[in-house]
Image (spheres, coloured by chain):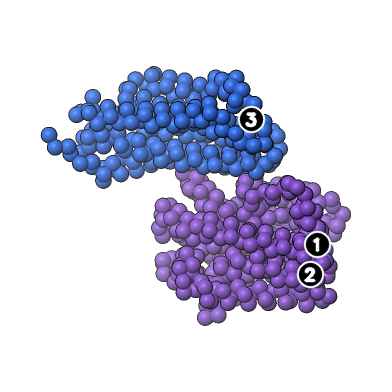
Chain colours: A purple, B blue
Amino acid sequence: MHDTVRFHYMDNLRALAMLAGVVFHAALAYSPLLHPYFPTADRAQSPAIDLVIWWLHLFRMPLFFVVAGFFAAMLLNKRGMAGLFLNRLRRIGLPLVIFCPLVIAAMSYSTLHAAAYVRNPSPVLLMIRQFSQMANPPAPPPGTGHLWFLYYLLFFYVLTWVARSLVPGKPGNFMRGLKPGWQLLLFPMLLAPALASVSAPHPAPESLFPQFWAFGFYGPFFVFGYLLSGHEALIDRFRGFAPWLLLASVALYGAFLYLLRRHVPTAASVPIALIEACISVWMTCVCLVAGRLLLNRSNRLLRYLSDASYWVYIVHLPILFVIQYRLMDMAWGWGAKFTVSVVATFAVCLLSYHLLVRKTVVGRLLGTRMPVAGSAAGA
Amino acid sequence: MNRSPLNWPVIRLLVAKDWQLFQQQLAACVFGGIVALCLIGMATGWSFYLGSLLLIVMLVCTSCFSISNSLLVERKEHTLAFVMSLPVTPLDYYLSKLIGNLVTFLVPFLAMLAGTVLVILYTPLPDGLVVLSLLIFGHVLLAYAVSLSVAMAVESEGWNIFAMIASMLLINPLIMLLGQIPAINDHVKADTIYFAPVAVAILLAQATLSVVVLAATGWVHCRKKSFY
């Protein structure tokens, strides 16, 4: 029965997707592609960073939304719609309202401080420095920062209720009934229009105003996860395809990087969007297959990291910014700076989790110590 | 005569019944509201106006569906006769309708109001638009209160439809009238928010009238000993 089963691989995949976000954000500072746009962009850069992080970027959050959809369906079956809303408001809505202003304020403060004192500023810091010298500097638009995914999860829960109220019958059965080959071909087609409407690699939808493309890209992954719940054997149907999907994704990624260099990045071209969509879907499936094969177990370390991942993800960016601003004036190579920033950020985040969160009211708020997987779902 | 206490369990059940019946339409309106927010978020001129218009349409739809589902359809399909067989007084019935309708209307109303104010404050739109927007939302609130009160007090379907359409359509003359008041119109395109005394007076009148209309309907129901 679902009520008593713990889906370790889903828990672990969720934690991996969250923790990979720390590495991803740390690497952005040393990415030549993002150098003009990222506040902590460093003088030390490497194209090798671009080669790895944009690959990860294409399926990290899609995988997260699959897991969130999976646990949403599980929670819905267990507690009903009202129970789902109450639980999600407590675990997602409340942390978003509490932590979003705090982390954004912390990042703003450290960024303004860095703009004033860093001797080797990034282009973004230079721009902020110029703005701060104006009589009436323009205020940045309000946003959700790196917690945008919590904001969209709330929309997806509301849309789950909308879909259940409006859509008659069980269209999920039709989608589940398609042959895996068709699923793997049609799913990317569904995502391509959304990806073609934004620049490549796709940005984070941080605006307070919901974005069509984010619903069109992440929404189908949430639905995919929702449809998997109770039908986990569907993942096994992709097992035979997994090695080929991995190979095809690697090959397509080469084409993606080649096209990216030739393309002006205002909005992705249709071929680029299609490639992005294929890699996102296929690599998400590969991760699900690998997770079910290799991560469907738990030990104290995995459980601890799984519990800590939500807190770590919420607080990592302000901490990372402070560390990387300090590193900007040091004459180290990108490898050393990247390693130090990742290790130090993880150390501070995990220490703060252990001392301030795990056994406190904050831990209960985030649901990081709940005994059932579904309780921390989607976070 | 002792006043009987309110029958809260039945009031809760009646609210839940209305919610169940209204859920599908509300879901459609919520979906429309999200589409409208996305349109506004596209940050182009046409999408902003289309999104704003869609938001107002969704707001009016929510209010009309809410009143129609919980009161008019109930009479038309003779479910009121069943409700009257329950251990409820006219005041219980009034409260269940008031609570159910206010919740289903005020939640999207306040969300849209907050969204509109945020759009104005954090986009290049002039901040002076906040006052005009509040006055328009104030009118929608008053129109809703009037329509709800009429629906609770008057049985005629024709009068109810007239009250809903007329009160909501008065939004156009209101916008024209506000455009004729220099103390309001002169500050609409300014970058600062200025609450002229006349604007404050209109806002207060809208809020007070909304409460008075609903309270008066409640007073009438409180004095009733039977449903008719």
Q: Nearer the viewer, mark 3 or mark 2?
A: 3
Per the image, the residue denoted by label 2 is A328
Q: Which mark is residue A52?
A: none
The answer to whether residue A67 is above or below residue B100 is below
Which residue extends farthest left?
B1
The answer to whether residue B162 is above or below residue B148 is above
Q: Secondary structure at mark 3?
A: loop
Disc 1 to disc 2: CB gap under 8 Å:
yes
Chain of the residue under the numbered disc 3 shown in the image? B
B216 relative to A265 in the view: left or right = left
Lower sequence index among marks 1 and 2? 1
Crowding at dot 2, Cα within 10 Å, few <14 / some 14-19 / many 20+, comes out as many
Q: CA distance from mark 1 to mark 2?
A: 9 Å
Picture residue at 67% right of the left edge, 36% below the top = B191
Q: CA distance from mark 1 to mark 3?
A: 40 Å
- The quarter of the rendered structure image containing the C terminus of chain A is bottom right
Amino acid of disc 2: Met
Chain of the residue under the numbered disc 1 shown in the image? A
Chain of the residue under the numbered disc 2 shown in the image? A
Q: Nearer the viewer, mark 1 or mark 3?
A: 3
Per the image, the residue denoted by label 1 is A122
- The quarter of the rendered structure image containing the N terminus of chain A is bottom left
Amino acid of disc 3: Val
Q: Secondary structure at mark 1?
A: loop
Per the image, the residue denoted by label 3 is B188
